[in-house]
Image (cartoon, rainbow, N blue to C red):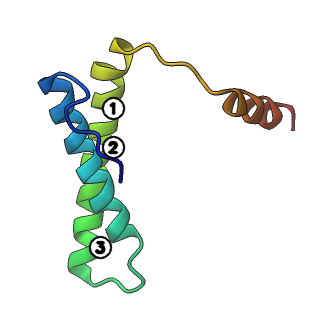
Amino acid sequence: MPNLEHYMDELHNKQLMRLLYWTAEWHTLAKLRMHMDTTLEHLHHLTKEFGCLMWQFRDQMCFQFNTVELPYEVAAQSRHQRG
């Protein structure tokens, strides 16, 4: 994982680090090949929390940064809408 610490102010950095941590934890649990009741329960809880964090990221952080879609993203979206 690239080092993303301290590229933003403290508030945004803290939120981003939290989101990255939860993403890694969710991904690790989701990739398990064999689950027990406790891991499924934890994954269920984590999925809810991860969803809330994604909504927070969208609502509180995204609008503060000027972002653009890359040309290949625009082309892929265009192909998807056509076909």
Between residue 41 and residue 10, name the one nearer to us.
10
Residue bearing mark 2: 51
Label 1 sits on what residue type?
Trp
Q: Nearer the viewer, residue 13 or 55?
A: 13
Q: Position of residue 71 (x, y in %)?
A: 70, 27
Residue type (three-letter) at the residue carrying disc 2: Gly
Dot 2: element: helix
**Residue for point 55% across, 19% down:** 68
Quadrant showing the C terminus = top right
Residue 58 place in picture, x, y as percent: 36, 26
The structure residue drawn at horizontal position 37% and vertical position 14%, both measured from the top left corner, is: 63
Cα distance, mark 1 to mark 3?
23 Å
Q: Which residue is mark 3?
A: 40
Query: Residue type at mark 3?
Result: Leu
Residue to which mark 1 is pinned? 55
**For the point 14% across and 25% down, which residue is it?**
11
Q: Residue furthest right?
A: 83
What is the x, y in percent for residue 33?
A: 42, 83
Asked if labels 1 and 2 touch by Cβ distance under 8 angstroms, the answer is: yes
Which labelled disc corresponds to residue 83?
none
